[in-house]
């Protein structure tokens, strides 16, 4: 018994004292380490050995925080996901950073990036996991997105281009030599002053020596522009913590994985990445956002301190020391509550993405009625209000309530997030074309996705196909972008391409309501013969001539898969009636086109019309397939409904 007690004490006692710092920077090879040491003015000899590994501690003044940030730098030493994961885990045994940053060089996609450009990861496509099918090995991508606070920091960071150019020139210290006879090639492919690119970075234990690999990788993620060997293990080690550690990846492009590959551009790429890091630490890295410890007095207005009464009944103020202590506790409480509520809001948003029902609205209202609502930071309240406004539009199309919520959010947090919400309000008031005209300047992924949706709603599938491959600078397509792209491909009659794209979206987020809906629609069209598919509308389940509906075994399997999926989507309560009608119509179309389920289709159609005599899709199919002999009464009710709506 005593032996086990002693063992327990030995296991639970910390082996190392963990030092709290602001930023941990990991490099991989010496060239990258030296570049970071130069920009942060670290002497190589000032190293700190810990269990046979070297670390460098330093500080960097932050204009944004108006204080020195504490920083530790470490060099992994070898290129692989396993090495990166081990080094990250090892560093976290000695230090507790608010954020970890992986910095170094990477291969870039020729024509998309230039050598010297800096790729700042929006997310990491980890291609290290493979699946073997039919004797062939294929990657099964794992996509790791940045933590929301890190994404906000990167998007909010306004890089001073002139400062970057000056500091890069000073640090690199030499002009790029153009080999005789290759001047044009170098001018086309090597950046004199690097450009910052926000993109997806692929990561796998493969040393690329084939530039065509990027074409193959883009099939797994359209946003991939760079590739390397460490970010997958690094990000996994950060995400596996409890709670997960915020992280980001900065990569200078050193080659194209082709004839340009070699060591000659390592210093150029490392220097460019290090200069970006230095400027980001100076005016972009918000430690209070990552590890909140204070908030403005305005965010705790509900927590004002009341005077106390002394023994004589006279009111007196608390001592300055006591007041400061209590205020500090209120600030810490408010910030902690805000961080928890932001997680709640993200959970509500994810629940909406999965179910598409009214439950998200009820949870938001409950959050607002909670006792801690008034003490939350203005930014947190604004996030909740904007989400509520968008749900009001989606579920009830109530523009007036949405406007009221939008105005309240604007009072809390200014114009942040307002362009997208205002565009949605305009859409519900005046339609997609007017909303599209008002959404001129796209600065965020959400705004770009809304623009693609407006184009699709306006019947401009071709415009979506033109827009998708060239997103605005700093924007990388996500699952929602891919869904809209798949529907645009469907609209243009490219069924095979649409099936490929929607399958990738399903792989990324298989539970999202909108992704499953799009997948079921695209699956339905696989049942139609090519001749019919080319001329039939793509976004409305129009009755098809049974002679032009395929009946083979694979077609029926896909058709029944889509029908089952539509049935699942009808389960959530509180769905908007128009949306429910549409999904019911698609399900009816699947049953009606199934050669073995005509009786079931007729019965389902009758049930729809019994519940809703004005169901437009059910009336259409009932007439086309002679499911119901007399539809005159239904048609009259539709006419009355249309007259009232006008």
Image (cartoon, helix red, strand yellow):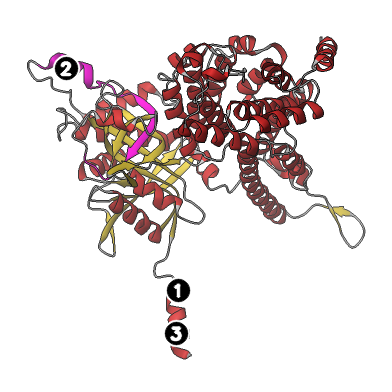
428 relative to 365, above or below: above
Can you tell which mark lies on residue 185? 2
> Of discs 3 and 1, which sits in the foreground?
3
The magenta-colored residue range is 182-207
Residue 66: percent from left, percent from top: 50, 39
Where is residue 554? Give x, y as percent: 46, 33
Compute the Cα span from label 1 to label 2.
60 Å
* Residue 227 is inside the magenta segment: no
Q: Is residue 386 left or right of residue 38?
A: right
- Residue 186 has which mark? none
Is residue 226 shown above or below 465? Answer: below
Quadrant containing the C terminus is: top right
Q: Which residue is mark 3?
A: 6
- Magenta stretch: residue 203 in it? yes
Which mark is on residue 13?
1
Task: Residue at 74%, 38% (x, y): give it.
Answer: 573
The residue sitting at 43% across, 25% down in the picture is 474
Above or below for 537 versus 102: above
Q: Between marks 3 and 1, how big is the CA–CA gap?
A: 11 Å
Task: Looking at this view, name the residue that lies furthest to the right.
Answer: 313
Question: Where is 439 relative to 612, above or below?
Answer: above
Sequence order check, earlier mark of 3 and 1? 3
């Amino acid at each position: 018994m005593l032996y086990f007690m002693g063992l327990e004490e030995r296991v639970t006692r910390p082996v190392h004292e963990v030092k709290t710092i602001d930023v941990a920077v990991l490099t991989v090879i010496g060239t990258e380490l030296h570049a970071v040491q130069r920009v942060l003015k670290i002497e190589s000899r000032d190293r700190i050995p810990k269990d046979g590994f070297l670390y460098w501690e330093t500080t960097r003044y932050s204009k944004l925080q108006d204080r020195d940030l504490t920083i530790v730098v470490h060099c992994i030493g070898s290129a692989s996901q396993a090495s990166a994961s081990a080094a990250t885990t090892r560093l976290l045994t000695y230090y507790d950073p608010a954020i970890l940053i992986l910095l170094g060089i990477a291969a870039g996609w020729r024509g998309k990036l230039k050598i010297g450009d800096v790729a700042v990861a929006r997310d990491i496509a980890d291609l290290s996991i493979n699946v073997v099918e039919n004797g062939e090995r294929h990657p099964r991508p794992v996509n790791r997105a940045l933590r929301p606070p890190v994404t906000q920091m990167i998007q909010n960071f306004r890089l001073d281009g002139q400062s970057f150019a000056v500091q890069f020139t000073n640090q690199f210290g030499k002009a790029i030599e153009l080999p005789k006879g290759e001047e044009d090639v170098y001018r086309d492919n090597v950046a004199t002053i690097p450009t910052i690119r926000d993109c997806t970075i692929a990561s796998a234990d493969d040393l690329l020596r084939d530039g065509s690999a990027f074409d193959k990788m883009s099939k797994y993620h359209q946003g991939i522009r760079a590739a390397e060997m460490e970010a997958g293990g690094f990000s996994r080690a950060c995400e596996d913590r409890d709670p997960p550690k915020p992280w980001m990846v900065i990569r200078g492009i050193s080659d194209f994985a082709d004839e340009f590959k070699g060591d000659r551009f390592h210093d150029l790429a490392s220097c460019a990445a290090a200069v970006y890091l230095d400027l980001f630490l100076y005016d972009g890295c918000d430690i209070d956002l990552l590890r909140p410890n204070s908030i403005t007095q305005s965010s705790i207005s509900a927590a004002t301190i009341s005077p106390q009464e002394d023994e004589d009944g006279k009111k007196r103020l608390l001592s300055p020391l006591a007041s400061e202590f209590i205020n500090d506790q209120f600030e810490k409480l408010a910030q902690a509550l805000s961080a928890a509520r932001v997680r709640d809001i993200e959970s509500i948003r994810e629940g909406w993405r999965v179910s598409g029902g009214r439950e998200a609205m009820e949870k938001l209202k409950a959050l607002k009625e909670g006792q801690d609502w008034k003490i939350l930071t203005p930014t947190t309240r604004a996030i909740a209000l904007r989400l509520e406004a968008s749900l009001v539009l989606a579920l009830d199309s109530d523009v007036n309530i949405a406007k009221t919520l939008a105005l309240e959010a604007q009072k809390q947090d200014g114009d942040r997030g307002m362009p997208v919400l205002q565009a949605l309000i305009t859409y519900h008031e005046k339609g997609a074309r007017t909303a599209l005209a008002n959404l001129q300047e796209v600065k965020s992924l959400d705004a770009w996705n809304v623009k693609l949706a407006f184009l699709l709603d306006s019947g401009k599938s071709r415009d979506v196909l033109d827009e998708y491959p060239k997103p605005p600078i700093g924007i990388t397509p996500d699952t929602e972008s891919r869904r809209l792209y798949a529907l645009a491909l469907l609209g243009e009659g490219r069924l095979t391409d649409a099936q490929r794209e929607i399958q990738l979206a399903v792989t990324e987020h298989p539970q999202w309501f909108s992704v499953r809906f799009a997948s079921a629609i695209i699956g339905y069209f696989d049942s139609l013969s090519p001749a019919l598919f080319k001329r039939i509308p793509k976004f409305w389940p129009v009755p098809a001539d049974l002679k032009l509906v395929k009946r083979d075994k694979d077609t029926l399997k896909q058709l029944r898969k889509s029908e089952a999926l539509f049935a699942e989507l009808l389960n959530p309560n509180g769905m908007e009636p128009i949306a429910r009608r549409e999904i019911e119509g698609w399900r009816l179309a699947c049953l009606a086109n199934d050669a073995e389920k005509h009786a079931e289709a007729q019965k389902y159609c009758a049930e729809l019309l019994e519940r809703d005599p004005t169901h437009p899709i059910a009336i259409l199919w009932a007439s086309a397939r002679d499911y119901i002999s007399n539809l005159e009464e239904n048609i009259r009710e539709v006419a009355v409904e249309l007259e009232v709506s006008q």
